[in-house]
Structure formats: C-alpha cells, structure tokens
Image (cartoon, helix red, strand yellow):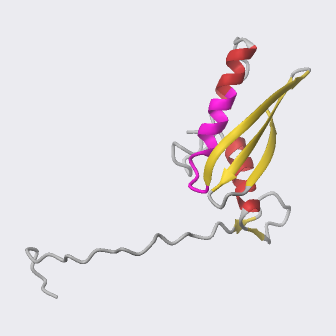
Amino acid sequence: MALSPIAQDNRVDTSAPVSQPSRTYDLFTTAMRSTVDGDDALRQFVRKALLTARSTYLIYDNQYGNEIETLIGQNVNNALFDVEIVRMVREALIYDDRVTSVDNFVITRSADACFVTFDVTSIGGSTITEEVAV
C-alpha cells in the first residue's frame, strides 16, 4: 500500500449494514439494573421521546423529543389540535431508525385531559400500541 495521496484505493465495501442491538438500560424501573431489548426498548424510546421536550436539554440533538408543550394552552379549535398532535407525535418518533411508521391515531378527551393512542411499526415488522396523556 502506497502512502502517496495520489494513489487511489478502488476497493468498495459491499457488505450489508450491520444492525446494532437496541439493548438499553430499563429507565422506568427504580433500580436501573436491568436492560431491555427489541420491542421493549422501542416502547421505552416512545415513552422517553414523548416525555422529553425538544431543544431543551443539551445532551440531545435538536431532533430528539417533541414540541407538544408549545401546543398546550393555546387557543386552537379541536380539529387543529388533533391534526397538530398527530404531526408532533409522528415527528418525535419517526426520528428513530427502528421506526418505520406511526399510524392509527385515536384521540379521546376526558374533562381537561387528552389521550392519544397510536400504533408504532418497527423495522422488524412488529407493531406496538401506545397511549399517552397530553
């Protein structure tokens, strides 16, 4: 192998991309001594991304988290609120490379609370259903 900057290396990497494990610490237990993987790790990501405000914490980049807090308390009608909640949840979750789609939104209201139920489809083909209170 020559050390000259003029010499070119024409080898091309044709290997398939290696899927990284999604194993992570279980953040929602009291001791944080266990780990989760697969659908449980994806479910944890969904919960964490929807609990984290976007562009607030320096440890995360500007695409992690959600902007739902900007919509709460605004004087908007229910139709606009529903459309914006769907958009904000989808934008918060599609950021992860394990998520292929976020669909089947059902928005229900009870007194002053709003509950959003939706399906998250992973790259493995599995679908998890989540419900969050907004």
The residue depicted at 74 percent of the width and 52 percent of the height is: 127
At x 63%, y 38%, the residue is 90
Q: Residue at x 71, y 65 (%)?
A: 38
Foreground pick, 129 / 53 = 129
For residue 33, above or below residue 4: above
User: Extreme front residue here?
Assistant: 125
Observer-nearest of 102 and 28: 102
Q: Quick check: can you spot residue 71?
A: no
Which residue is located at x 41 percent, y 75 percent?
15
Drawn side of residue 128 relative to residue 86, left or right = right
Magenta region: which residues?
85-98
Percent across and percent down for residue 104 are: 74, 37
The chief SS type of the magenta part is: helix
Residue 43's quadrant in the figure? bottom right
Q: Is residue 68 left or right of residue 113?
A: left
The residue furthest bottom is: 1
Relative image position of residue 53 (x, y in whole percent): 64, 38
Q: Nearer the viewer, residue 108 or 76?
A: 108
Height in image: 36 above or below 112?
below
